[in-house]
């Protein structure tokens, strides 16, 4: 199982560096002032900011009741002082990191001596907040079988509507040094409960159970509700304060983690310590876990296209290669036929080369595509043909050795592909005129592959199709990932989204190419689609649409239906289809078959657009 707090000498060194540079250091004066004749209490350790005023100090005989014991991952236990102070900003709980399997039990009254520290899950460069803890502990059990401190309820009434304070400009945008205002900001509220025994009541699941035995709920059932039960991330200011990650303390071998989909309910009381980890931030690590009550969510099926409608779709098939089990090919194929109604043109992302992650210079994906199209035919779909441009080895990012690329599948019984001087990995397709109409110089071809924006990233694939005598230009994309961006719970507020710079350049390149087509024919039918890896409200999407060249078609849907991916309980847009001005009337569908479900064939939902050229 993945560790909640992976620890290493490297991380320890990073934290030591942070302490030395003052990034995590509390006030030395405050620390000295806290050391007095009075015994140190947990709320003295936690203090009123995110960083302990006793950071780096030795403490002796800190008293508390054990509220949770973790025997895997980051091993240790939580203690809580049953005698709380009168300051809501100071937590009464703290994690004791033992490294070895703890020997204490829930309900033990203990005295702990050790070193106060701030551990950053994911390391200093992650931007994550730190966890106040006591390490290298000496533990004395005073008594056993004690009643636990009453769990603090987390619910729609206790969690503030505002997400986080603005970071301190003098501290590089960090909120670490700011006094907590738990009644005003959601992040401050959760931080003021760090390490404490907390509970939630019956809550809606907004992020399905993942392979790491965790799920997401919302304690605010009304907050930006998705039509099918999730919680929609509709702007950078709509972080959805009610989201909370749920894990369990019991090892999986002892107690299997429940399987839940978005829209299900975690019923009854879920209670345990409030932790913070690098894979989602504040997490209720359940000592007592509620029961999942399944909802009625089922994979969607889009409406088949009419005879005179062209159906164009995009689907990220998540690193598909011939070494995947036949079951994956069959499941994806069934989705194409039954859920997507066999679109006329299907742009695929993350098609890997013929031996997948094996890093031996192979770039062809002929075997991958033959296996996939055969599976589609076997599922009752059309005999799709394909067009693509093989990438240069190790030049397009993705899984090492996989050489992912975009591919066009098309149904030759409904649409024809205009093949014109097919390009290669390094040759840019251009825009020309043929018989007085806009045309691609290379079809299929790559858009501006030498542009630095595409370094170590997938280059756009452009193709020219003809449907019922009308030309349609399709540009398939897989923009740079969000890897490296800070999470919503970052100590920088707003979080640093460093990956946006590259996607902005990529969007500008594609927008410029579309404008070249429109300059030759303002009425050209152009579709830009794929895994854009960014939101419909992002600067990336704005740059794609610049000058009215394109319209993000997902904006035609009600806000409660705008999503293709679920991340940390937020249903959000990553996959898109954008239309040129000539495509005035269309039907758009984000076909929800994966993102909301624990059992997935891909982590993305496909998108379909139908129109009459």
Image (cartoon, rainbow, N blue to C red):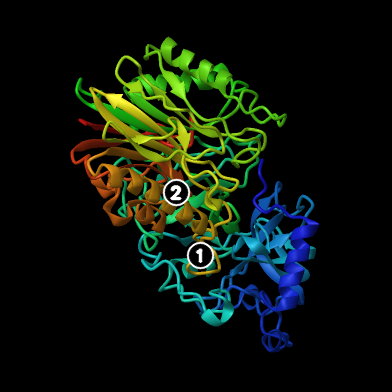
User: Is 417 left, or right, of 87 in this rendering?
Assistant: left
Gap in Å between the C-alphas at discs 2 and 1?
Answer: 17 Å
Picture layout, residue 341 above or below residue 406 = above
Which residue is drawn at the image coordinates 72% and 77% (left, top)?
A: 21
Q: Which residue is mark 2?
A: 569
Viewer-proximal residue among 489 and 355: 355
Which residue is drawn at the image coordinates 42% and 12% (left, top)?
A: 377
Secondary structure of residue under mark 1? loop
Q: Which residue is mark 1?
A: 495
Neighbour class for label 1 at 10 Å: few (<14), some, many (≥20)?
some
Seen as rendered, the residue at the extreme front is 435
Res. 18 image quadrant: bottom right
Secondary structure of residue under mark 2? loop
Q: Position of residue 216 (x, y in %)?
A: 47, 47
Res. 59 image quadrant: bottom right
Q: Is residue 136 visible?
A: yes
Given this view, does label 2 or label 1 mark the residue nearer the observer? 1
Viewer-proximal residue among 456 and 32: 456
Picture layout, residue 364 above or below residue 45 = above
Q: Position of residue 375 (x, y in %)?
A: 47, 14
User: Is 381 left, or right, of 600 in this rendering?
Assistant: left
User: Is 320 left, or right, of 73 in this rendering?
Assistant: left
Task: Report if the CB atoms under discs 2 and 1 are less than 8 Å apart.
Answer: no
User: Is 194 left, or right, of 182 in this rendering?
Assistant: right
The circle drawn on residue 509 is none
Q: Position of residue 433 (x, y in %)?
A: 32, 36
Q: Position of residue 344 (x, y in %)?
A: 32, 23
First-in-chain label (2 vs 1): 1
Which residue is drawn at the image coordinates 35% and 56% (left, top)?
A: 542
Picture layout, residue 124 above or below residue 102 = below
Image quarter of the N terminus: top right
Image quarter of the C terminus: top left
């Amino acid at each position: 199982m993945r560790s909640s707090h992976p620890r290493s000498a490297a991380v320890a060194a990073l934290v030591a560096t942070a302490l030395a540079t003052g990034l995590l250091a509390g006030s030395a004066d405050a620390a000295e002032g806290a050391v007095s004749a009075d015994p140190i209490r947990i709320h003295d350790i936690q203090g009123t900011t995110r960083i302990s005023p006793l950071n780096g100090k030795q403490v002796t005989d800190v008293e508390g009741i054990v509220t949770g014991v973790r025997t895997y991952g980051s091993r240790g236990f939580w203690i809580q002082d049953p005698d709380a102070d009168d300051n809501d900003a100071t937590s009464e709980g703290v994690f004791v990191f033992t490294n070895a399997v703890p020997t204490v039990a829930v309900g033990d009254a203990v005295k702990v001596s050790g070193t106060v520290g701030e551990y950053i899950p994911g390391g200093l460069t992650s931007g994550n907040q730190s966890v106040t803890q006591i390490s290298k502990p000496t533990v004395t059990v005073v008594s056993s079988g004690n009643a636990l401190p009453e769990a603090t309820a987390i619910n729609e009434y206790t969690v503030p509507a505002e997400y986080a304070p603005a970071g301190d400009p003098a501290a590089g945008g960090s909120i670490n040094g700011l006094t907590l205002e738990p009644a005003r900001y959601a992040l401050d509220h959760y931080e003021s409960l760090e390490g404490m025994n907390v509970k939630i009541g019956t809550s809606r699941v907004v992020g399905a159970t993942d392979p790491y035995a965790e799920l997401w709920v919302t304690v605010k059932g009304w907050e930006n509700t998705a039509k099918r039960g999730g919680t929609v991330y509709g702007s950078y200011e709509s972080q959805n304060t009610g989201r909370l990650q749920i894990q369990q303390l019991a090892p999986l071998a002892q107690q299997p983690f429940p399987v839940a989909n978005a829209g299900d309910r975690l019923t009854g009381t879920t209670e345990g310590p409030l932790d913070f980890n690098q894979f989602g931030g504040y997490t209720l690590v359940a000592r007592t876990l509620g029961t999942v009550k399944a909802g009625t969510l089922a994979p969607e099926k889009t409406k088949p296209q009419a005879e005179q409608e062209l159906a164009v779709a995009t689907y990220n098939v998540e690193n598909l290669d011939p070494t995947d089990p036949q079951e994956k090919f069959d499941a994806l194929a069934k989705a194409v036929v039954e859920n997507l109604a066999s679109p006329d043109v299907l742009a695929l992302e993350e098609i890997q080369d013929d031996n997948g992650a094996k890093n031996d210079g192979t770039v062809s994906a002929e075997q991958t595509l033959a296996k996939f199209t055969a599976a589609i035919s076997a599922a009752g779909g059309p005999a799709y043909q394909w067009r693509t441009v093989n990438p240069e080895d190790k030049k397009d990012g993705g899984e090492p050795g996989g050489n992912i690329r975009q591919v066009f599948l098309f149904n030759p019984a409904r649409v024809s592909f205009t093949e014109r001087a097919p390009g290669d990995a390094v040759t840019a397709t251009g825009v020309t005129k043929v018989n007085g109409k806009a045309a691609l110089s290379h079809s299929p071809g790559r858009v501006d592959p030498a542009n630095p924006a595409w370094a170590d990233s997938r280059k756009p694939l452009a193709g020219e199709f003809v449907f019922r005598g009308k030309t349609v230009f399709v540009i398939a994309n897989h923009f740079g990932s969000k890897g490296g961006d800070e999470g919503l719970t970052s100590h920088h507020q707003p979080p640093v989204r460093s990956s946006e710079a590259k996607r902005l350049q990529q969007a500008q390149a594609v927008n410029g190419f579309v404008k070249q087509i429109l300059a030759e024919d303002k009425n050209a039918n152009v579709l830009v689609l794929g895994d854009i890896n960014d939101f419909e409200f992002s600067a990336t999407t704005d740059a794609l649409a610049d000058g009215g060249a394109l319209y993000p078609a997902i904006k035609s849907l009600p806000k409660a239906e705008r999503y293709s991916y679920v991340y940390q309980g937020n249903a959000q847009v990553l996959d898109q289809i954008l239309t040129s001005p000539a495509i005035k009337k269309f039907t758009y569908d984000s076909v929800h078959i994966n993102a909301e479900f624990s059992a997935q064939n891909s982590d993305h939902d496909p998108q379909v657009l139908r129109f009459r050229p």
